[in-house]
Each structure stands twice: as C-alpha cells, then as structure tokens.
Image (tube, rainbow, N blue to C red):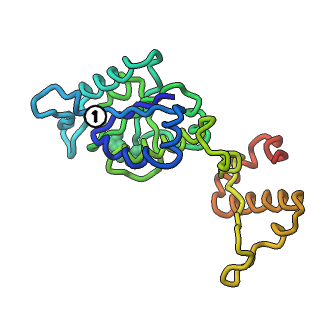
C-alpha cells in the first residue's frame, strides 16, 4: 500500500512513523508513507494556503488551489489515483469495520487540514471521503491521520509480528475483548480467576466469551445491541 499524507506539519508524523509496527511495516515494504507539505503548493510569495470565508464569520478556511495541486502531484506518482480521505469531525466515524476495508486498498491519500475548515470544493471536486476519528475537535487533522494510519497498517497482512494477532482484538468479533492476566498469580491480594489456571480450554473459551459479552453489555450497550442483531453464525463461532 502507498499512503500519501497532505499536511502543513509533516514533521508531526516523524515520531509515530519511526517506531514499532509502523516502522517495521515500512522497512518490510508493506507500506510506503509519503508526506507532502501543502504549503509547497502555494502560489504567492507569502506561501498563503488559507483565506477569509465568503459570507463573513470568524476563522480562516483552507484554499482549494494549493490543495488540488498537492493532491494531483501525489496522484501523478502512481498508476491508481487512490482513495482520497478528508479528516474532519463532520465525517463518518472511523470504525474497525472501516479500518479493515481501507487496509485492502492499494493507495490512500489523506488530507490533514488546519484552520477552521476546508473550502467545500476540496471535498466535492476531489471526491474526498470525510472521515472522523471521534466526536471531539482536534487542532488539526494530523493526529486523526496518524490514528487512521496506525489502525489501517496493522491490519495489512505481514505488518504484525508473529506474537501479535489481530484476531483477538476488541471489535474483531463485534465484542470487547475479554480480561487478560499474566504472572504473578496473586498481586497485592488480587488473584487471577481460578478457571484460567485450570487447563480446561473448553471452559476457558466459554468463560472468555461470557466475559466479552458481559463487559460489552455493561460498557458499550450500543455495540451489544448491534451484536445481538447480527447473524447468529457469528455468535456460535470462536
Ligand atoms: N477526526 N479535526 C480537521 C480542520 C477542519 C475544520 C472543519 C474540516 C472542517 C478531526 C476529527 C478533527 C479538527 C481535523 C478540525 N476541517 N479530524 N480540522 N474529530 O477534529 O478527524
């Protein structure tokens, strides 16, 4: 996969991209991540990329010119144009289902904006898909793009190490993950549940399934309702 990121702050990506799974995935050529500075596509001597909103109002809006030129520059570097994604609180929420879908694309182009918004023609003219990482407001799209990249890249086959597995992740079966324990058996008077020490893997699987269901019902009732409405085959698996 090739991921282009269009941003005014490319340096913000340096640290997340140079550690752990994202670092290894790039080293193994599972993903190529290319950063472009939108300001390099400004056309005036002040390198201006934002302007006042038509109709008045507070704040500045990102101009379409530099953004279109930056996207087209990125698209010219590969055969497929790639799916264009706009990070914005107005987008559809990023879910694990969407993450898995995006992980099968050959090419993504992420637009991480600043200021109070984008000229609407950036969305319509570039057929950009708005995606939100959650119902809160960030100072810019960079952290949203990083969250999306992290979640998507780890789902590409070969990105996780042999000891890591996406199969047991929360949401992979539509439920929250069951509780985990490691040594010691007793820590500050808190004991590991007896069943996990029993060696009875049938009973352990059943217990974990019950725990998954119970914590999903308690903590994420809306996810639990969706799970109950899903195909019965999903529920008999695992
Ligand atoms: N999930 N932001 C985008 C600029 C902006 C403002 C208005 C479009 C309309 C966010 C989120 C997020 C802050 C990124 C505002 N763009 N991104 N930025 N929530 O809050 O992804």
Q: Is residue 88 left or right of residue 149?
A: left
Ligand 1 quadrant assignment: top left
Q: Is residue 58 above or below residue 158?
A: below
Residue 1: give x, y in percent of width and height: 52, 28
Q: Is residue 87 left or right of residue 152?
A: left
Whether residue 89 can be seen here: no
Residue 63: give x, y in percent of width and height: 24, 31
Residue 137: give x, y in percent of width and height: 38, 51
Residue situated furthest front in the rendering: 27
Mark 1 residue element? strand
Q: Residue at x 41, y 39 (%)?
A: 87
Q: Is residue 156 above or below residue 18?
A: above
Report which residue position mark 1 lands on: 37
Viewer-closest of 85 and 6: 6
Q: Residue at x 67, y 55 (%)?
A: 176
Q: Residue at x 39, y 20 (%)?
A: 75
């Amino acid at each position: 996969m090739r991921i282009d990121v269009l941003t005014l702050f490319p340096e913000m990506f340096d640290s997340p991209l140079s550690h752990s799974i994202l670092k290894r995935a790039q080293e193994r050529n599972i993903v190529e991540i290319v950063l472009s500075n939108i300001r390099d596509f400004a056309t005036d001597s002040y390198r201006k990329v934002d302007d006042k909103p038509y109709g008045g109002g507070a704040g500045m809006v990102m101009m379409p010119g530099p953004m279109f030129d930056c996207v087209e520059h990125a698209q010219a570097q590969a055969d497929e144009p790639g799916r264009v994604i706009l990070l914005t609180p107005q987008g559809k929420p990023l879910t694990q289902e969407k993450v898995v879908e995006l992980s099968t694309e050959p090419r993504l182009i992420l637009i991480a904006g600043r200021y109070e918004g984008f000229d609407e023609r950036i969305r319509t003219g570039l057929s950009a898909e708005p995606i939100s990482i959650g119902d809160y407001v960030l100072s810019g799209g960079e952290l949203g793009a990083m969250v999306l990249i992290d979640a998507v890249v780890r789902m590409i086959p070969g990105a996780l190490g042999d000891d890591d597995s996406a199969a047991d992740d929360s949401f992979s079966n539509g439920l929250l993950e069951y509780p985990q324990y490691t040594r010691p058996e007793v820590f500050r008077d808190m004991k590991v549940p007896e069943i996990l020490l029993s060696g009875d893997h049938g009973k352990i699987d059943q217990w974990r399934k019950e725990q998954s269901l119970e914590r999903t019902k308690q903590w994420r009732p809306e996810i639990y309702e969706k799970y109950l409405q899903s195909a019965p085959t999903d529920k008999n698996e695992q």
